[in-house]
Image (cartoon, grey):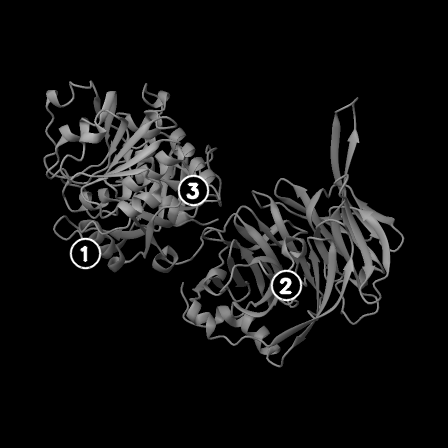
Amino acid sequence: MSYPEQFSGFQAPSAEKWLEFEKNSWTPRPFGDYDVDIKIECCGVCASDMHTISGDWGGCPYPLAVGHEVVGKVLRVGPKVTLAKVGQRVGCGAQVYSCLDCRQCKNDNETYCKHQIDAYGAPYLDTGYTTQGGYSSHTRIHEYWVYPIPEAIASSDAAPMLCAGITVYSPLKRFGAGPGKKVGVVGIGGLGHYAVMFAKALGAEVWAISRSRAKEADAKKMGADGFLATSEKGWNEPHKMTFDLIVNTANSFDGFQLSEYLSLLDVHGRWNSVGLPGGEGVKVNNFDFISNGCFIGTSHLGSRREMLEMFDLVAEKGIKSWVEEIPISREGLQQAMEKLKKSSVRYRSCMTGYDEAFGARNPQSANLLLNLLTMSSAGIAEIPISPLSLTRRYQRVSAKTEITSVGMTPTSSSSSTTSAFSVSAAQSTGQSWVDFFDLSSQKGYTKAAGTHAALAPAEAGKNRVATLRDWTVQVGQGVEYHHGSTVLVRDFSTGKTVVELKEAVSEPVVWSNDGIAIAAGEGHGRMGVWDARTGARVGRVVSHIDNITHAAFMPDHKLVTLSRDGTVRITDPRTAKTISKLEIEGNGSTNPRLLAVSPNGRSIVSLWGNTVHIWLPKANHLTSYNLNTTRTTEGWPLCISPDTRWLVSRTENGFDIVDIASGQIAWENHQDGGVATMVTAASFSADTKVLLLGRMNGSVEVWDLDEGSAVENARVGVESLGLTGSKRN
């Protein structure tokens, strides 16, 4: 397995030419047992970056890449690493090392360690290497300063919190901001806007304090209960001795009268400065704080424990950064620095577009080089949408509760043997049942207990289905229960079990195209493959490090799998060897939602979060686009057609079908019926001529699709998307 021997990034060449960023490469320090390599996705912009490379804080080693609000994906971990894993989305902030052994480190004060090392511009122990920051392709860091980012937080929201956010969260938490406390925030900028939002989220009464009222409206939107403008005469008089804590984030002390601010504090209240403006600082007079005995101090960043607490709070409360995204480049960094100089950022900047700047090559992808073509909404719109219309054939009541899954026999919908199923849970017991019926006559077959079903191709034998059966067994008296699962191959017309796969315990459950093999989950990020006729194991997938959520066979019996570890793998189950691997970048990398493989195995379409990825593994091309840039209304994806041409989504008013080649809505249905008629499941026939829907009220609908003459062109469009446009290596 190969890894990048050199990192690259945008470096300031000198204090005199600090804005003339140069794109350079360098050799990182030697990789250690506790080290983590991170492929950077985005990096927040901090005023410290500007003060450092401009020489405002003194000399620094040039050339230097700054940036210490990094979010990316773990590429490599040392043999002793336990706090991070490959494929995980993580962040790292302004500190990259401390001894972890001194009094400070052992008491959650590692940011005050005498041996601390900054994220950039600092010698790293005795290696002879200088730390480089996050305006770079990669970073290498000790595991202790690597923080997992909750899935609910977008990368560009999380990045600025790794410095600006933790800098204000730590004093707020340490000094008791919460219910019954009155907190003031001086300076409504990058740090200040987090201080307002965090203090409010912690339950405190929050007042924003600024020179003028220019930001009052914004501060109120952030959650401030009140606003004070210090340029107004007597601004502090009504509020003297009423504040418990004031966090000062101001970036300038020009005209700063400390005595006026300290007068706001109650007895033994605390003034905590975290802003780091240049200049001579502020003068302190003992008489300024003798009347209330207040404390004056500062704080530095925050501990690992506080960082993890902060992200938990952000995820729980849904806190969003007020952030401006700027694609990283020489010009982009110059733009970001100019906005800092002019104090025009509202309220934090984040450098993005790292794949475009540094290349999308994944050094762990089994030597697979993917040319990533990120499609703009304008570019996608140029692809013609295939004509499509739908007609509802019938509606069938299958249950009294929500339909959670539907499916059809993977043969031609015109075949007389085509059957279908729906899965629902009994209202009284919660037991899930699979209801089988004939697609043409609506004749019902048996009902079988099971949480998941996969109908077999005709080649596997008539009326074959694989079901995931769950059961609960009492093993003691009263309350002790044992839960188990297994996959059964049945004849659904009689309910008779043909084969039992005892080691298959979880979804996904899928058949090979010829009906010879079945793949099913084994737990622990693994899948097994069995001979559907005998139940004998014939292969496995063992290379994922997190749960496998979706799977599909290719025509040659290779298995495609999606995992929450952020990878798509093509595996030969007979050898358990990975043939190809695609690493998913961005916010959806831990949220796999759908998978489909084209009948010829040429294209693999997967949905992660709201991003569609069309992968042509043999052509070594990937095309990706975000549905939010192409849809005009919100949709919740349900299924992809077997030919990888259509995407069905639930909407607030019904459902629609998106043309995957263009990303545009090709057909939509509006239905007034409220939550009861909400579409909850969908599945296509193998020839994509029939759509089966399940609804919240327990009904199942069969829809016939009529496609226009441009359909074949649409198929070619999907499979050639990655071959058009400019290539990037």
| Residue 508 numbered tag | none
For residue 693, what is the image quadrant? bottom right
Q: Residue at x 55, y 65 (%)?
A: 618
Image coordinates for residue 73, horizontal then vertical, percent: 44, 46
Residue type beneath disc 3: Val
Q: Is residue 624 above or below residue 399?
A: below
Q: Considering depth in this image, is 485 or 503 the residue closer to the camera?
A: 485
Q: Give the vertical position of 680 relative to 271 (above or below).
A: below
548 shown above or below 175: below
Q: Calculate the distance from the C-alpha at mark 3 to the C-alpha at mark 2.
A: 42 Å
As helix, strand or loop, the secondary structure at mark 1 comes to: loop
The residue carrying mark 2 is 671
| Distance of label 1 from label 2 (alpha carbons) | 58 Å
Kind of residue indicated by mark 2: Gln
Residue 90 numbered mark, or none: 3
Residue placed most toward the observer, 460 or 255: 255
* Place of residue 673 in the rendered image (x, y in percent of width and height, measured from the top left): 65, 58
> Mark 3 Cα within 10 Å, few/some/many (few <14, many 20+)?
many
Image coordinates for residue 87, horizontal then vertical, percent: 49, 45
Q: Tag 3's secondary structure? A: strand
x then y, percent, for residue 370: 47, 61
Mark number, residue 20? 1
User: Contact (CB < 8 A) between labels 1 and 2?
Assistant: no
